[in-house]
Image (tube, helix red, strand yellow):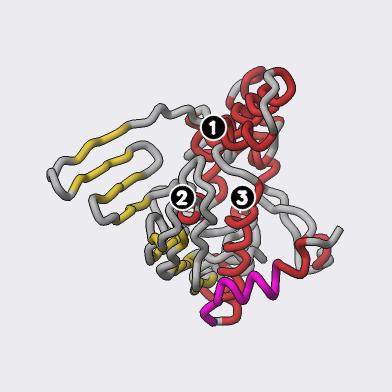
């Protein structure tokens, strides 16, 4: 939303807000009705008769694809943060035993529902999960022409022309937890993924390829980047006399209003999906956000 709504740095123009939002999606595949018949009543991968042949085996995902290759970070450390230390101090075998111990944790038909729901079960059968996150979802955001006065008082569409953004999140992909996208402009297009950015110029026919430095870590290096920029912003305010607003813009690249807007759009899209309707952004904001802005 920051990329599509916000004016250029230093501009006093208002953000170009969306007009309509629609969304469709559901949990299409990871439902109990899709569970392989041969799996029977198993609720845990390590007790399942078809575990060895299941592409969603927790043992395969966490052990065979990750820990056996030396990865003790995400997603292994989410199962048990101690595994990293065990691996570094005692080796693969003890780390494997600890991982399998965690993955084998299970429940029975006699386990209270509240007990089952209050904790994660990393070895749980994916078709038995109570996860309600969509495994396939599309969101379409539409902007109308929204001219505003320029510095000379004339009506201008600069940066505020009609446009459409489509977001597709799908579980069934080679690029798990990675992003791919394409931006179609009037002078060219940009194609990107988690490692490469391609910029094509319609006029010249040339394509330039950029390979940003890969820092690794959570969210493709985003976690480290945010922490680093935040510390620099705090230092600029405390030790360099910079204002908070200036530090936010200089080191973080956005402000609280822009971050808030991005989150609000997600809730609007979820309303559109659940209610199967087209959300009018201005009306939704007036109904769902405005009444709460001045509450303490």
Q: Is residue 268 left or right of residue 177?
A: right
- In which quadrant of the rendered image does the C terminus lie? bottom right
Q: Could you tell me what secondary structure mostly forms the magenta stretch?
A: helix
Secondary element at tag 2: helix
Q: Locate residue 65, reporting x and y percent.
A: 47, 39
The residue at which mark 3 appears reads as 259
Labels 1 and 3: the sequence-earlier one: 1
- Quadrant of residue 159 in the image? bottom left
What is the magenta range?
A: 277-289
Q: Locate residue 92, reporting x and y percent.
A: 58, 26
Who's the residue at 46% across and 67% down the image?
141
Q: Please say whether residue 92 is visible from this viewpoint.
A: yes
Who's the residue at 70% across and 67% down the image?
289
Labels 1 and 2: the sequence-earlier one: 2
The residue at which mark 1 appears reads as 217
Q: Is residue 51 left or right of residue 182?
A: right
Q: For mark 3, does the 10 Å Cα neighbourhood hold few (<14), some (14 to 19), or many (20 or more) residues?
A: few
Who's the residue at 57% across and 42% down the image?
254
| Residue 287 sits above or below residue 133 on the image | below
Mark 3 → mark 2, Cα distance in angstroms:
11 Å
């Amino acid at each position: 939303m920051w990329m599509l709504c916000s004016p250029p740095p230093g501009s006093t123009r208002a953000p170009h807000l969306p007009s309509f939002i629609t969304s469709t999606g559901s949990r299409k595949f990871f439902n109990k009705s899709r569970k392989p018949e041969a799996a029977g009543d198993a609720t845990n991968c390590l007790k399942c008769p078809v575990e060895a042949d299941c592409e969603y085996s927790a043992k395969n995902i966490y052990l065979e694809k990750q820990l056996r290759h030396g990865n003790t970070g995400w997603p292994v450390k989410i199962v048990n943060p101690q595994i990293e230390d065990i691996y570094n101090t005692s080796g693969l075998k003890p780390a494997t035993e600890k991982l399998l111990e965690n993955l084998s944790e299970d429940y029975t038909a006699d386990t209270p529902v509240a007990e089952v729901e209050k904790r994660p079960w990393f070895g749980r059968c994916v078709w038995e999960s109570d996860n309600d996150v969509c495994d396939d979802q599309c969101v379409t955001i539409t902007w109308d022409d929204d001219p505003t006065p320029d510095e000379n008082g004339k009506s201008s569409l600069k940066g505020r022309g009609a446009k459409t953004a489509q977001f597709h999140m799908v579980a069934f992909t080679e690029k798990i937890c990675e992003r791919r996208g394409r931006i179609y402009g009037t002078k060219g297009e940009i194609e990107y993924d988690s490692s490469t950015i391609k910029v094509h110029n319609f006029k010249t026919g040339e394509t330039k390829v950029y390979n940003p430095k890969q820092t690794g870590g959570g969210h493709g290096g985003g976690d480290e980047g945010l922490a680093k920029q935040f510390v620099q912003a705090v230092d600029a305010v405390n030790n360099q006399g910079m204002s908070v607003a200036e530090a936010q813009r200089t080191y973080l690249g956005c402000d609280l209003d822009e971050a808030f807007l991005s989150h609000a759009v997600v809730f609007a899209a979820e309303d559109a999906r659940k209610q199967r309707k087209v959300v009018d952004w201005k009306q939704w904001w007036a109904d769902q956000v405005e009444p709460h802005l001045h509450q303490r």
